[in-house]
Image (tube, rainbow, N blue to C red):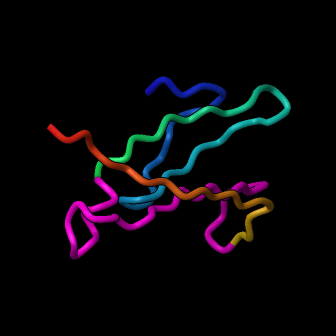
Amino acid sequence: KNSTGIMGQIEEVTHNAIAFYWNPLESPAKVNVAVQCLSTDFSNQKGVKGLPLHLQIDTYDEYRESCTPVHRGYCQIKVFCDKG
């Protein structure tokens, strides 16, 4: 939904991974990601600190099962909800 620069459909590979094709020579790919959990969902002490989640993006020349990515980027995210 609301993604741009993607060729074809987004394929859900597993419950926590997707795959799609894009051509960097035509335009950048922009993909919206929705996180359906809180950082505190995986912590024993609810609401105290929460655990960091990571978003990882691997770029391949061609998608194959045993292919090594040409680039890997990741960032840490924390998801909290407002009190009230």
Q: Quadrant of the C terminus?
A: top left
Residues in magenta, as a range: 38-66
Query: Residue at position x 69%, y 57% from top?
Result: 73
- Residue 66: horizontal and vertical position, in percent? 66, 74
| Residue in the picture at 55% in, 35% down | 31
Residue 77 vs residue 58, the one in the foreground:
77
- Residue displayed at 47% across by 47% down: 11
Q: x, y percentage for residue 58?
A: 66, 58
Most common secondary structure along the magenta stretch: loop
How far across and down, in percent of the image, does residue 34 sit?
39, 41
Total marks shown come to 0
Instruction: Using the rendered view, name the quadrant where residue 78 is placed.
Output: bottom left
Furthest toward the left, the residue is 84
- Depth check: give the residue in front, 54 or 68: 54
Q: Would you say 51 lies left or right of 27 here?
A: left
Q: Residue at x 58, y 59 (%)?
A: 56
- Residue 30 forms part of the magenta stretch: no
Q: Image height check: is 19 above or below 3? A: below
Q: Position of residue 69 (x, y in %)?
A: 74, 64
Quarter holding the N terminus is top left
Which of the pair 63/38 is nearer the observer?
38
